[in-house]
Image (cartoon, helix red, strand yellow):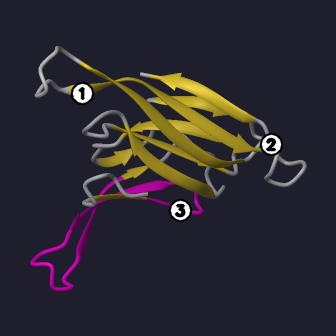
């Protein structure tokens, strides 16, 4: 998934890795230069495909959540560089319960009373759905407060 700026991309690999990319659009005339910034491994089971990754964690989107067929939801530092072997946290680890979809809702509060005050996330709520029975519709949804 893309971050809000459109200059960072997290791609999932069938090997269980997440690759973080910095994207340079150059002059905007079709000369796009991707640069691999980090490879995230060790959180998910090696050789098991990932289904997605999304940025979250406030205005700077400091965090990344990834999920996959291994039944794990991992939280990573989205500004990592190099080879990263351990996530910040593994929120779920259910090998018999593949996670198909995850989304993040961030509840923001305004600090101070002025209109120019910074808006910071109060908390992030991560919702997930998956499972092995009944197809995709009607499967349990798990919610996690994170911050």
Residue 46 in sight from this viewpoint: yes
Q: How far apart are marks 3 and 2 (CA)?
A: 25 Å
Residue beneath disc 1: 119
Q: Do the residues labelled 1 and 2 touch (CB within 8 Å)?
A: no
Figure quadrant of residue 21: bottom left
Q: Residue at x 79, y 53 (%)?
A: 136
Q: Which residue lies furthest to the top in this view?
A: 112
Q: Which of marks 1 and 3 is nearer the N terminus?
A: 3
How far apart, in angstroms, are the residues tagged by discs 1 and 3?
A: 34 Å
Asked if one can make out residue 16 in the rendered structure from this viewpoint, the answer is no
Does dot 2 land on a helix, a strand or a loop? loop
Would you name the residue on which mark 3 appears?
13
The residue that disc 2 covers is: 139
Q: Where is residue 84 in the image (x, y as percent from the top left)?
A: 39, 43
Magenta region: which residues? 11-38
Dot 3: what SS?
loop
Q: Which of 39 and 63 is in front in this view?
A: 63
Image coordinates for residue 81, horizontal then vertical, percent: 27, 47
As drawn, is 57 to the left or to the right of 117?
A: right
Residue 60 percent across, percent down from the top left: 25, 39
Question: Looking at the figure, which quarter contains the N terminus?
Answer: bottom left
Mark 1 or 2, closer to the camera? 1
Q: Which mark is residue 136?
A: none
Q: Earlier in the sequence, mark 3 or mark 2?
A: 3
């Amino acid at each position: 998934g893309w971050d809000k700026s459109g200059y960072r991309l997290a791609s999932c690999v069938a090997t269980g890795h997440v690759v973080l990319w910095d994207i340079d659009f150059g002059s905007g005339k079709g000369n796009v230069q991707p640069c691999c910034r980090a490879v995230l491994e060790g959180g998910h089971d090696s050789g098991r495909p990932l289904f997605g990754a999304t940025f979250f964690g406030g205005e700077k989107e400091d965090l990344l959540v990834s999920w996959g067929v291994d039944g794990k939801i991992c939280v990573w530092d989205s500004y990592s560089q190099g080879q990263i072997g351990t996530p910040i946290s593994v929120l779920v680890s259910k090998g018999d319960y593949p996670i198909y979809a995850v989304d993040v809702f961030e509840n923001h509060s305004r600090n101070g009373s002025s209109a120019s005050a910074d808006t910071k996330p109060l908390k992030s709520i991560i919702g997930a759905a998956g499972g092995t029975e009944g197809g995709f519709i009607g499967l349990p949804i798990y919610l996690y407060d994170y911050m």
